[in-house]
Image (cartoon, coloured by chain):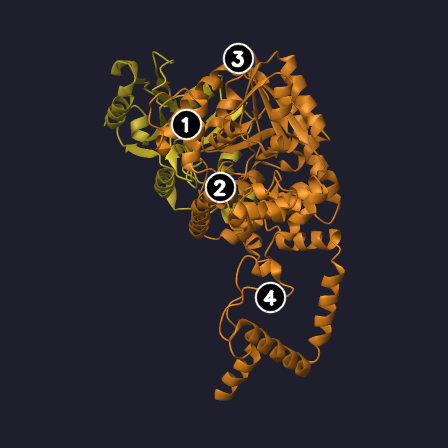
Amino acid sequence: MGESFITRSSAALADHSLKRALAKAQSGFAAKRAAAVAECDDFAALRRRARLARERALDHLAEYLEQFERQVQAAGGTVHWAETPADMRTIVIDICRARNARFITKGKSMVSEEVGLNQALEQAGFTVNETDLGEYIIQLAGETPSHIVAPALHKTREQITDLFRTHHTLGDRPLEEVAAIVDEARTVIRERFLRADVGITGANMLIAETGQVVLVTNEGNGDLTAGLPGCHIVTASIEKVVANREDASAILRVLARSSTGQHITAYTSFFTGPGGNAAQDAPAFHVVLLDNGRSDMLAGPYRDMLRCIKCAACLNHCPVYQSVGGHAYDAVYPGPMGSVLTPLLRGELRDFQLPAATTACGRCDEVCPVEIPLTSLMRQLRQDTRTPSTLARLTIRCYTWLARYPRLYRLLTNIAMTGLRLLAGGGKPLSRLPLAHAWTRHKDLPALPPTTFQQQWQKRGDKR
Amino acid sequence: MPGSGTAAVAVSAYGMPAGQEGLVAMFMQQARKSAAEVRRADSRQALENDLAELLAWMPLATADIQLADDYPMLVSVADDTDPRCRLVRAESGIAETGSICLAGSRHTTRELFLCEHLVVLLRVDDILYCQEDYWRQQVSTAPQSLHLVSGPSRTADVEQTLQIGAHGPRGMTILLADANAASGRKS
């Protein structure tokens, strides 16, 4: 994988399989969300209510986390605090060792991706099986998720069929139809559900008032991971907490609609400790909560980003993400939300290119169900972290000066127009342009009209 | 929250329908959107017929499936290891989302998620408007698990193509029982 976003995205743009996979996903997500939003009486009100729930959570974060811990303890569960990714890995490995576990099933958890949990568990000698179909596919491929809701979005059906043929004992069974692929995974993974010693899931929310972990899924794999083994470990980040069940409901109303365009997902489940059911062998219950820089974010100028409910609407509506896919970001969280989160959470030098990977079109702001000003946050990050080059600064200064003298501006643009038309040989497109190779390397500059915009505007004005 | 009763109404996705019949209609529409089959039994006989037909998958004599006189107590089921079909009774239904609510017990995961087809019995009177109404009913401490189920399992992880029947049930039927069907009166 290339060192910079530019080289990675250039490679992505040349990848035809990826292009096909992205094209399939793009129209689907946006259209489904639009329909689900349109069918509500007043989606704007739902959005405001969801934002309120998230703001309330951030305003009282420490208090709610402590309340959550007390409630989980009262129900016979345990909350563990992980300041760093290494802490989370150690805590989870220790729990698994204490249970003499060998086989671990996993539901989708972006936090577990953030800390590299699978690799650590495997190195510690455990067998780890992802159970979400998308996660399972990329586990077979040895890849990382390219989308926070649909991890295998970048894979075509043919690629998935090939993966299954390589890794499963299939014989001559046909595996071309989507139904056959899903059935094959169901059969293989079902056996793993029944054998698992420990199940690890993520969390969509943590409810302070009741000590419940909310898990939202469509496949049912999260519930089978949580409910069948003798031990359920939840990996989540601290900002997932909400005050109470009413606030959780407010977020659930916008989550599925923004994410997959459903009015609700097939399964919305609430888990807590075994409580009085401990005698009936309800699973042991551990919640491991990761900070990894979020406490610092809370106190700083990027606090709004912590409202994020990981619905992926901003990815699904981003022209940059839709063109290059998730892997070009080389980050756990891609797209607009990832372009803000990644530099703040991971903060490696290369991550600071990501806030520049935007067209500033603002669609992410429009679709965010908790009204995070993503475009502003990206702009702010760019200002905070990038010093513009001398050439760029000089160019802007020249322009600022020039724009104050309309006559001179018109004169110079007329000269430039004439020059460019001469260079192009009349009404032809330009395939090369001084100082703009980055543009002309990929596309031609369209043929220039004989008159400037201002001249055309003046003419229209004369007619009126 | 102050005045949470009205606040809940104000932030739901759709306005509150009039009367219990309005809630039932909304519930049916929303559950069908999630690919659940919804049937309504208005008499004891109709309910028994529906159950017999739906549970014909199970290696059970119809006689094994009995409704106690004071249904909702459902008397079932001889063999609980057969994975083909499972019958559960929902505590409540939520009209806004077409979901059924079920507090977990030791067998809940197996019952709800390991069968091929899930049959859920729900009393019409137990249909509430929104999740907030259900929360208000839950006064004691949270159960170990609580499930809001909205249709059969599904995935769109292969080329964003919706496929019903992922890891959980491939189909779900909700049997709505009217009060006179539930009360045990033969009509």
Indicate the amino acid at tag 1: Ala
A452 and A78: which is toward the camera: A452
Residue found at x 75% / y 66%: A394
Camera-near label (1 vs 2) is 2
Kind of element beneath mark 3? helix
Mark 1: few/some/many CA within 10 Å (<14, 14-19, 20+)? many
Sequence-wise first label, 4 or 2 = 2
Sequence-wise first label, 2 or 3 = 2
Indicate the amino acid at tag 2: Ala
Does residue A41 lie above or below A333 as drawn? below
Mark 4: few/some/many CA within 10 Å (<14, 14-19, 20+)? some
Question: Which residue was labeled with disc 3?
Answer: A280
The alpha-carbon separation of the residues under discs 4 and 1 comes to 70 Å
Mark 3: few/some/many CA within 10 Å (<14, 14-19, 20+)? few
Question: In the rendered image, is residue B99 in sight?
Answer: no
Question: In the rendered image, is residue A397 in sight?
Answer: yes
Does residue A67 lie above or below A353 as drawn? above
B25 and A281: which is toward the camera: A281
- Is A155 left, or right, of A172 in this rendering? right
Residue A433, label in figure:
4
Question: Which residue was labeled with disc 1?
Answer: B90
Question: Which residue was labeled with disc 2?
Answer: A256
The alpha-carbon separation of the residues under discs 4 and 2 comes to 47 Å
Indicate the amino acid at tag 4: Leu
Dot 4 and dot 2 within a common chain: yes
Total count of labels: 4
Mark 2: few/some/many CA within 10 Å (<14, 14-19, 20+)? many
